[in-house]
Image (cartoon, helix red, strand yellow):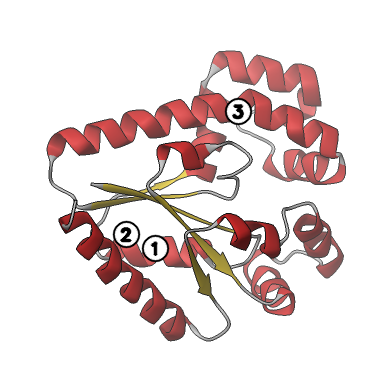
Amino acid sequence: MLRIGITGGFGSGKSTAAAYYEEKQYPVIYADPLAKELMVKDKAIRKKLTNLLGKKAYLPDTSLNKEYVAHVIFSEPAKKREVERIVHPAVLDSIEKSFSKLLKKKAFSLAFVEAALIYESRMEEMLDYVVVVTAPVEDRIRRIAKRDKTSEDEIRKRIAAQRPDEYLISRADFVIQNNGDIRHLHQRCAFLEKLFLSMEQGL
């Protein structure tokens, strides 16, 4: 079973690429929702984040105050790094356990993990290959604005806070240029699917 990571910048289309493989019945782990779940359910993480970000990090119903946390980490790089130090180890441990369970089942040739911070968390060390999805900045802004109703200024700020595409491409095993419509993206995902299956069968 090949372990394949899918990453890319904010609004690049990495989640759409991951969804393609999920629709093909491959297991896909989404790291961001997993991280948010751990930030709520893991008491140790919750305590550390409250100490770091203040009580506003959580809403009265105990759920994560996503908008507040996102605003802080994209506005203050030092706090962003500290949040990552707190959360990443638990996320990596959970993903490794999920991969181990899948491997024991011997039911899948490919398994995917979608994550924005594959390189920052050193997740690539547990993966066989990493696919980076890229897209023109203006396309990314348009998609995010339509999806999240977020201001262009806020979107540009979040994009600027991430690693540039050039960095991701320099470390990737494969690159999907998402510069067309969804059919165009799916065609490239399908090509990689065939390639990965042939590589897995050759192991």
The mark that comes first in sequence, 3 or 2, is: 2
Say above or below: 178 vs 109: below
Choose between 109 and 37: the one closer to the eye.
109
Q: Which mark is residue 138?
A: none
Q: Which mark is residue 19?
A: 1
Determine whether, in the image, residue 183 is placed left or right of residue 143: left
Instruction: Name the secondary structure under disc 1.
Output: helix
**Label 3 amino acid?**
Val
Choose between 41 and 185: the one closer to the eye.
185
Choose between 74 and 200: the one closer to the eye.
200
Tag 3 and tag 2, C-beta contact below 8 Å: no
Q: Which residue is mark 3?
A: 87
- Rounded to the nearest angstrom, the CA distance separating label 1 from label 2 is 5 Å
Determine whether, in the image, residue 88 is placed left or right of residue 152: left
Q: Which residue is mark 2?
A: 22
Name the spot of residue 136 as percent of width and height, x first. 68, 77
The mark that comes first in sequence, 3 or 1, is: 1
Tag 1 and tag 2, C-beta contact below 8 Å: yes
Rendered image quadrant of residue 53:
top right
**Label 1 amino acid?**
Ala
Name the spot of residue 162 as percent of width and height, x first. 73, 53
